[in-house]
Image (cartoon, helix red, strand yellow):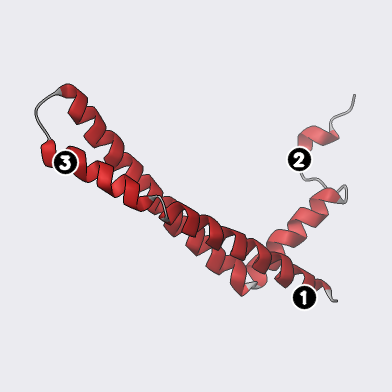
Amino acid sequence: MSRKDLVALIARSFAVYLTILAVWDASYLAEVFYSAWHYLRESPPLREHQYWIAYYRLRTVLSCLRIIGAMMAARFFWNAGPGVEKLFASASRGQAGLNPNPVNNLPL
């Protein structure tokens, strides 16, 4: 197995993991939407309800962003293009002792 095949295998495995993570997060969207709808529908002028409206609005937006980000990252890793190879190549160089961090090279 060549290095390019190994990088593609690892990248696609990570893409499958990210896809499962996105589907897992998407399964919670119904609960978040229902809770947000509950507080938006009632919406009396009580401060407590205003807090919950803002909370579920934020939770809905962040959940959607997390799902979209995971799917975009999964697509990036699934293609296993030159960007992914550079990512893994820079990680292997850092492990080989060629760490570009100047703090590690300070004299004792």
Helix, strand or loop at disc 1? helix
Q: Which mark is residue 40?
A: 3
Residue at image position (13%, 42%) is 41
Residue 98 appears left or right of 42:
right
Quarter of the figure that contains the N terminus: bottom right
Q: Which mark is residue 5?
A: 1
Judging depth in this view, the residue of 25 and 66 nearest the camera is 25
Marks 3 and 1 sit apart, C-alpha to C-alpha, by 51 Å
Residue at image position (53%, 55%) is 21
Q: Which mark is residue 86?
A: none
Q: Give the residue type at disc 2.
A: Asn
Judging depth in this view, the residue of 16 and 62 nearest the camera is 16
- Residue contact at pointers 3 and 1, CB within 8 angstroms: no
Q: Position of residue 15 (x, y in %)?
A: 60, 64
Residue at image position (60%, 71%) is 78
Helix, strand or loop at disc 2? loop
Q: Which mark is residue 101?
A: 2
> Which of the two labelled residues, at mark 1 and mark 2, occupies the earlier sequence position?
1
Q: Position of residue 96 (x, y in %)?
A: 87, 51
Q: Give the residue type at disc 3.
A: Leu
